[in-house]
Image (spheres, rainbow, N blue to C red):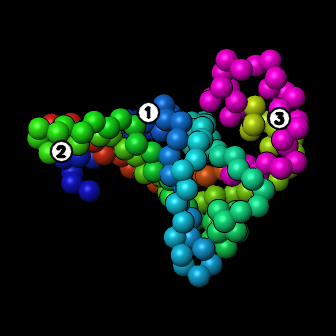
């Protein structure tokens, strides 16, 4: 990364805090990379990112084979057509993914996810969470490294 584009740690954390979607990248047992767009929320006190998904699937298989993952978020982007450039800010997180299977912990994390992504949809929240709990997996990404970059003035 060009040193001039690197952003301070605090700015990278803010991009992560304010984002809603990113791309989670995993690697299969045979080394095949797999990136999937996914929504998320960040818990600063735990220095962790949480995701929800189905209990079975390619990303779950990959995490079971190799728990090291990468997660990328684009904060803002704007194509400056007349200058043939893009202004952007982004963050890349790497760390270890853990699958949360305990129902009480899954329920807690689903409530946090709803608070982060759908704060105005409170009325049916409990019903929806209880109904979906058996079919939902929660992934915790414990952040080992976070880096960010920005291009604004080129």
Q: Which residue is mark 1?
A: 14
* Residue 145 higher or lower than 124, as above or below: below
Determine crowd level at label 3: few under 14, some 14-19, many 20+ residues with C-alpha closer than 10 A.
some
Res. 129 mark: 3
Look at the numbered disc 3 and give the secondary structure of its residue: helix
Report whether residue 136 is seen.
yes
The quadrant holding residue 113 is top right
Q: What range of the chain is rendered magenta?
A: 112-139
Determine the main secondary structure of the stretch shown in magenta: helix
Q: Which mark is residue 85?
A: 2
Q: Is residue 141 above or below residue 14?
A: below
Dot 3 or dot 2: first in sequence order is: 2
Residue beneath the point at 48% across and 31% down: 18
Image spot of residue 141 (x, y percent): 61, 52
Magenta run includes residue 55: no
SS class, disc 1: helix
Nearer to the camera, 131 or 27: 131
């Amino acid at each position: 990364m060009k040193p001039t584009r690197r952003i301070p740690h605090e700015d990278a954390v803010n991009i992560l805090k304010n984002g809603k979607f990113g791309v989670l990248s995993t690697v299969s047992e045979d080394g095949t990379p797999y990136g999937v767009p996914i929504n998320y929320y960040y818990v600063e006190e735990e220095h962790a990112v949480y995701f929800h998904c189905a209990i079975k699937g390619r990303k779950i298989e990959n995490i079971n084979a190799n728990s090291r993952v990468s997660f990328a978020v684009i904060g803002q982007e704007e194509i400056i057509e007349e200058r043939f450039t893009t202004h952007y800010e982004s963050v890349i997180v790497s760390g270890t993914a853990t699958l949360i299977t305990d129902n009480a912990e899954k329920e807690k994390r689903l409530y946090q996810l709803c608070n982060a992504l759908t704060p105005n949809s409170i009325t049916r929240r409990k019903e929806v969470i209880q109904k979906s709990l058996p079919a939902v997996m929660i992934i915790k990404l414990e952040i080992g490294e976070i880096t960010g970059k920005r291009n604004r003035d080129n």
